Amino acid sequence: MLVWDDHVHALGVAEMDATHFEFTALVNSLAACDDAEFAALFEKLLEHCRLHFTSEGRLMRISRFPALNEHEGEHHRIYGDLVQMNRAVQRGRLMLPRAFVKQGLEEWFTLHLASMDAALAAHLKRVGEARVDMSGGLPVLM
Ligand SMILES: [Fe+2]
Ligand SMILES: [Fe+2]
């Protein structure tokens, strides 16, 4: 089970933290739901991931994040896996997707958050601070 823990999961960038909180909540709902609810929730997870990865892609571009290709490559890989799983789910084949949600996806998230997302958050904070130094204003990324 993926229990949200500020000390482990919060990266200090509000937009990313809100998205990651939503991700953990969705994964937990999927892990706990019955078969009748699974397909609709899985579609929700897919849509969440599309927005999640688009949002991080935007943050990477506006801040000129150096590891953009590597990070987006990883997003595309896991999204491709989810799209494939969703085909099985929509045909009522839930065994593999259920196992994936409980193990693969949790493991992927924990590792991805601690590596690529943490690097992006650290970069965003550095860029934000640099802008504050220059303008004396609020740390807003434009
Ligand atoms: Fe993320
Ligand atoms: Fe990411």
Image (tube, rainbow, N blue to C red):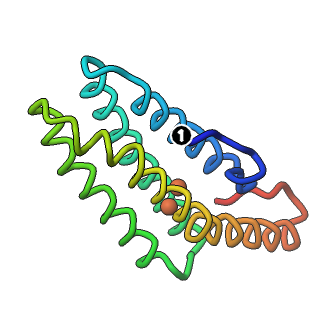
* Residue that numbered label 1 is attached to: 1
Query: Does mark 1's beta carbon lie closer than 8 Å to ligand 1?
Result: no
In the displayed structure, 134 sits above or below 98; it is below
Q: Which percent across, then down, holds residue 31? A: 42, 33
Badge 1 element: loop
Q: Quadrant of the C terminus?
A: bottom right
- 1 lies above or below 11: above
Give the residue at the far left of this rendering.
91
Q: In this view, does 80 lie to the left or right of 126?
A: left
Towards the viewer: 73 or 109:
109
| Image spot of residue 80 (x, y percent) | 24, 58
Q: In which quarter of the image is residue 74?
A: bottom left
Up-down: is 79 above or below 122?
above
> In the shown orientation, is residue 4 left or right of residue 107?
right
Viewer-proximal residue, 122 or 1?
1
Total marks shown come to 1
Residue that appears at 13% across and 42% down: 87
Give the vertical position of 37 relative to 11 (above or below).
Answer: above
Residue 134, position in %: x, y? 85, 73
In the image, what residue type sits under mark 1?
Met
- Residue ID at (86%, 58%): 137
Q: Position of residue 119 (x, y in %)?
A: 63, 72
Q: Which residue is drawn at 48% across and 57% down?
A: 107
Left or right: 87 in relation to 100: left
Residue furthest bottom as drawn = 66
Image quarter of the N terminus: top right
Residue at the spot 17% in from the left edge and 51% down from the top edge: 84
Mark 1 crowdedness (10 Å alpha carbons): few <14, some 14-19, many ≥20: few
